[in-house]
Amino acid sequence: MKAVIQRVTQASVSVNGEIISCIGRGLCVLIGLKKDDNAADMEYIAMPATESEPFYNNFLLELGKQYKPELIKDGKFGAMMQVLIENDGPVTLEIESPVRVSQ
């Protein structure tokens, strides 16, 4: 299971030129499913903020170790932010770590 989540001021879905779904301010979530996804995958994707903030902070630290720290920029976790993104494409790339079996 994969999720790409974006907070938006508005989003809509059109089919054959007709808007079939739309929202104002909220979250736009793109979900990718594969045949062997299960409930544990769903629970991980829905991780609560109490677990996701330390996970995110550790991720930023690791990025700083692997790349030039001055190139790593972030916002403020949990804050209301307005992020301006102008896509050059349409191109969206997603990188997913491999699945590991717990022992």
Image: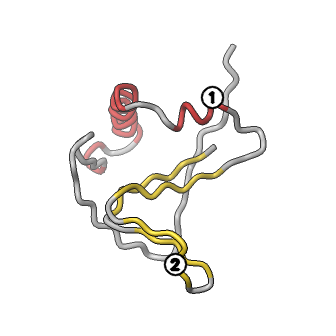
Going by the numbered disc 1, the residue's amino acid type is Ala
Q: How crowded is mark 1: few (under 14 residues within 10 Å), some or many (20 or more)?
A: few
Location of residue 15 (image quadrant): bottom right
Location of residue 63 (image quadrant): top left
Q: For the view shown, which residue lies furthest in the right direction?
A: 35
Residue 38 versus residue 28 in the image, above or below = above
> Is label 2 in contact with label 1 (beta carbons under 8 Å)?
no
Q: Name the residue under label 1.
A: 40
Give the residue at x 55% y 77%. 14
Who is closer to the viewer here, 11 or 87?
Answer: 11
| Residue 19 numbered mark, or none | 2
Marks 2, 1: nearer the viewer: 2
Q: Quadrant of the N terminus?
A: top right
Element at label 2: strand
| Residue 61 numbered mark, or none | none
Q: How crowded is mark 2: few (under 14 residues within 10 Å), some or many (20 or more)?
A: few
Q: Position of residue 19 (x, y in %)?
A: 51, 78
Q: Where is residue 88 in the image (x, y as percent from the top left)?
A: 44, 75
Q: How far apart are marks 2 and 1 (CA)?
A: 34 Å
Q: For the view shown, which residue lies furthest in the bottom direction?
A: 17
Going by the numbered disc 2, the residue's amino acid type is Ile
**How are the residues colored?**
secondary structure
Give the residue at x 45% y 58%. 28
Give the residue at x 59% y 36%. 42
Closer to the N terminus: mark 2 or mark 1?
2
Q: Position of residue 17 (x, y in %)?
A: 56, 86
Who is closer to the viewer here, 36 or 57?
Answer: 36
**Left of 54 or right of it: where is 70?**
left
Residue 5 versus residue 92 in the image, above or below = above
Q: In which quarter of the image is the C terminus?
A: top right
